[in-house]
Amino acid sequence: MKLLTSTILTAILSYALPASSRTIPITLDIVNAQGAPDGFKRSMVTANGTYPGPLLTATKGDTLVVTVHNKLTDDTMRRSTSIDFDGIFSSTSNAFNEGSSFVTTCPIAPGESYTYTVPLIDGQAGTFWYHSQLSVQYVDGLRGALIVYDPEDPQRHLYDVDDENTIWQVGDWWHNTTLPLLAGYVATGIVPVSDSGTFNGVGRYQGGPEVPFHVVNVQAGKRYRFRIINTSARNVFTMSVDSHNLTIIETDGTNTAPMTVNQLDLLAGQRHSVVLAANQPVANYWINAPFVGGSPARNLNQNATLSRGILRYKGAPNADPASPMTLGPAEAELNALVEANLRPLITSPAPEADINITLNLVVTAGKAQWNVNNVSYLSPEVPTLVKILEGANSADDFNVTENTFVLPANKIVQVIFPPSDDDEEHPFHLHGNNFWLIKSNSSEEINTANPVKRDVAGVGSTGTIVRFSTANPGPWFFHCHIFWHLQAGLATVMASGLDEVRKEVHPTSAWNKLCPAYDALPADEQ
Ligand SMILES: *C1O[C@H](CO)[C@@H](O)[C@H](O)[C@H]1NC(C)=O
Ligand SMILES: *[C@@H]1O[C@H](CO)[C@@H](O)[C@H](O)[C@H]1NC(C)=O
Ligand SMILES: *[C@@H]1O[C@H](CO)[C@@H](O)[C@H](O)[C@H]1NC(C)=O
Ligand SMILES: *[C@@H]1O[C@H](CO)[C@@H](O)[C@H](O)[C@H]1NC(C)=O
Ligand SMILES: *[C@@H]1O[C@H](CO)[C@@H](O)[C@H](O)[C@H]1NC(C)=O
Ligand SMILES: *[C@@H]1O[C@H](CO)[C@@H](O)[C@H](O)[C@H]1NC(C)=O
Ligand SMILES: *[C@@H]1O[C@H](CO)[C@@H](O)[C@H](O)[C@H]1NC(C)=O
Ligand SMILES: *[C@@H]1O[C@H](CO)[C@@H](O)[C@H](O)[C@H]1NC(C)=O
Ligand SMILES: *[C@@H]1O[C@H](CO)[C@@H](O)[C@H](O)[C@H]1NC(C)=O
Ligand SMILES: [Cu+2]
């Protein structure tokens, strides 16, 4: 009888779902694998043995059901794991599947499995990615693209091709594994400087073997939607393609009014879709992806000029471009993206703020320690969400080092980052939501009328202001996407609507088992 009832209920529920809504089952085996993305062989943490991991695709409105099997064994890197689907909105009720270690979940212990059910809500579509959200583990390779296609894309007429071959993932790469690198950072206060940059998983370092560059094939006369994802953990990449313009149409999952540039910067975690018209003579062209991040003098393997790919027209020889490798357009021809000039395709004015929060980012000199308002974030042992479900109700219910801001539901929160005196931009990323970027570091102007909405924005020397809504309550991690800085404390938790969270979040028994399993692990398996 019970079975019958639930069968009928399932039938009714599926009938009520919109026709486009499908369930996408995905399996990811998290394994250590030997690889040499830039020609230097090392052990990595990967999804299914590759760097980047397998491409995940879905259509607007689908539900991803991602089963992760943790098969990690190499103890020079973290052995537990947790997956964040970066940029994907999370409803309050699904906060426990959001993947942020010690904020919304405990990590998955080695030998264990967990299934993340991730419904794509609010008509969200665009360019996203997934990565480990446990310490700096994604530096070891666990990163990959997640594309959500929109069959009703309002900008579909602007391009002809958008498929698995039009994704560009740039990332920084280190020869050593993260536990020794992190120990070096803690001992010296100097963020490890990357050995190389990779373009779709391949790169070169100074003096290393001539690993073939990734080739992007195009056909003259066609227009391509390239989806660029900065999967780096530190470096800022500057993208350009010799002799071609790039028309930006998407920023972090938000459609933008087309804007043509010939160079754009992406901070760690940021994404852009650009349209490239293959309107030049049939030939090979350099795709330039140089990066900056720390002093190259600290790592003589590094040569940012070697971070690149090849755009090959059909009919062109199987060879490197004849032109020299440059860092991008010459000064006189430069038409670079200014973030503050981006406009959403559909105007979305920022509502007036109900609450102001000022966040001051300050490094402790000579130490691997970053502070937000004098507090260096330390992951709690009991995840924030568990504390809330157990009754935590105010900031006093969290240790000061959890840097947790308790906020009411259904308000507009304005976060003001005063100008920093650091020469590195900190890409601040909000989980589960996005924000109106009303003041970009690239401009002095405050724009509440038609700001772009995105989920990662750089905080730098001119100051940054964002506004977000707490209509979707939850404990949402808000942190620097330079994961070395995050690990050194550059993070906060924006915990809104705690009563709503208690009402709406009903975790599964599989999720409830994650913490006891993780807590029981010896230190080297955590
Ligand atoms: C933003 O801030 C960074 C770091 O503080 C600075 O180096 C950079 O030039 C600024 N960006 C722009 C476009 O002004
Ligand atoms: C990952 O590997 C597993 C095991 O081979 C396979 O079943 C799964 O389909 C792969 N996942 C993706 C996304 O390719
Ligand atoms: C990694 O770091 C350890 C500890 O500092 C060092 O002994 C080892 O040589 C390094 N390996 C590489 C490949 O840099
Ligand atoms: C990726 O982000 C990092 C860190 O913010 C940055 O140093 C690097 O230049 C970015 N890459 C691109 C292609 O913009
Ligand atoms: C790129 O855009 C500039 C300015 O809009 C234009 O002058 C130039 O002809 C374009 N170049 C190509 C290759 O389309
Ligand atoms: C970096 O690589 C480029 C291209 O091979 C080369 O021209 C340049 O000399 C290299 N830089 C250094 C510092 O060796
Ligand atoms: C927030 O700060 C801005 C700028 O200082 C100020 O104009 C505004 O009145 C403040 N809003 C609230 C709700 O405190
Ligand atoms: C940070 O600490 C310093 C020195 O203790 C103090 O002067 C300052 O007011 C504090 N700032 C904040 C935002 O709490
Ligand atoms: C709680 O915060 C204090 C500083 O106020 C810190 O020393 C301590 O390590 C924190 N405890 C935990 C469990 O995070
Ligand atoms: Cu940072």
Image (cartoon, helix red, strand yellow):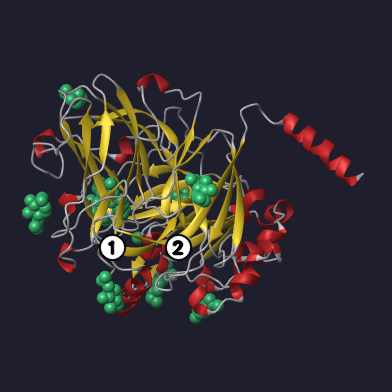
> Residue 480 placed where, x, y %?
40, 58
Element type at marker 2?
strand
Q: Residue at x 54, y 79 (%)?
A: 522
Badge 2 crowding class, 10 Å Cα cut-off, few under 14, some 14 to 19, many 20 or more, is many
**Label 2 sits on residue:** 491
Q: Going by the image, does 313 lie left or right of 142?
A: left
Q: Going by the image, does 116 lie left or right of 301?
A: right
> Residue 299 placed where, x, y %?
18, 66
Classify residue 39 by image quadrant.
Answer: bottom left
Badge 1 crowding class, 10 Å Cα cut-off, few under 14, some 14 to 19, many 20 or more, is few
* Residue in the foreground of this view, choosing between 398 and 482: 482
- Rendered position, 353 above or below 358: above
1 or 2: tag closer to the N-terminus? 1
Classify residue 342 by image quadrant.
Answer: top left
Ligand 5: quadrant of the figure: top left
Element type at marker 1?
loop
**Label 1 sits on residue:** 41
Q: Going by the image, does 117 lie left or right of 70?
A: right
- Rendered position, 507 above or below 383: above
Residue 432 visible in the current orientation: no
Classify residue 145 by image quadrant.
Answer: top left
Q: Mark 1–mark 2 contact, CB under 8 Å?
A: no
Looking at the rendered image, the quarter that the N terminus falls into is top right
